[in-house]
Amino acid sequence: MTSREIDEILERYRLKDQVRTGWELRNVSEPESVADHSWGTAYLCIRFADTAGVNLERALSLAVVHDLAEAVAGDVARRANPADQSVPDEEKRRRERDVMDRWSEREPRLVELWNEYESGETAAALFVREMNLLDMCLQALYYERLGRNPPDMDLQEFFETSEPRLTSESGRRVHAAIRAEYELTRDERVRRKT
């Protein structure tokens, strides 16, 4: 292995230190990294692939690379109110596309998987997109249960931004169950505070 190849791998490893911006914006203590989120998405793929009838190996591959460009392009949080977006969606896509174009000659397999996820045209890509959204909601519930978000900070926006992007009935059902648990936990925290 050459020094250049090692440097390329280490560039992708930056994803382990790339903190998820959405949690930072809400002052969550010790927020997850983008790599942590990718692991959560992959775990949910293992959990639900059979039920969804998708190829697990393909889904796992997509889950692992779906946010890989953020190692260089950075993480941009989606906001419920488009006026609150720090970077427009088109600019975010352009930045990530530039990263993947740069990597395409040396790692075409990564780029192929990333392109499949981004296009959202295959059953596996649509499934992983839903697992990505559900992971975010589960993470909001996790932070609420641990009290890692500030007492006055409601993480409801994560549910609001994910719900309209869910395409399957099973995804909407799981989302509703997670949201109900989140709301119960949040309401209990508010009751204890008063």
Image (tube, helix red, strand yellow):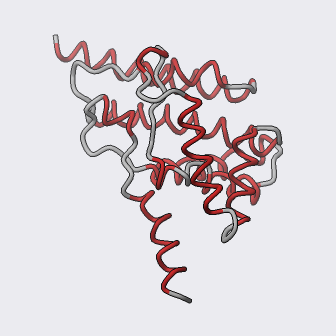
Q: Left of 152 or right of it: where is 135?
A: right
Q: Left of 136 or right of it: where is 23?
A: left
Residue 54 position, x and y percent, is: 81, 47
Task: Find the residue positioned furthest to the left.
Answer: 194
Residue 84 position, x and y percent, is: 41, 18
Q: Left of 21 or right of it: where is 57?
A: right
Residue 138 position, x and y percent, is: 48, 35
142 w.r.t. 80: above or below: below
Residue depicted at x 62% and y 49%: 66
87 w.r.t. 160: above or below: below
Residue depicted at x 59% and y 26%: 175
Task: Find the residue positioned furthest to the bottom.
Answer: 1
Q: Quadrant of residue 56?
A: bottom right
Assign the N terminus to one quadrant of the image.
bottom right
188 w.r.t. 35: above or below: above
What number of labels is visible?
Answer: 0
Assign the C terminus to one quadrant of the image.
top left
Q: Quadrant of residue 100?
A: bottom right
Residue 49 position, x and y percent, is: 74, 47
Residue depicted at x 40% and y 42%: 20
Task: Find the residue positioned furthest to the top.
Answer: 194
Residue depicted at x 82% and y 38%: 121
Query: 10 or 103: nearer the eye?
Result: 103
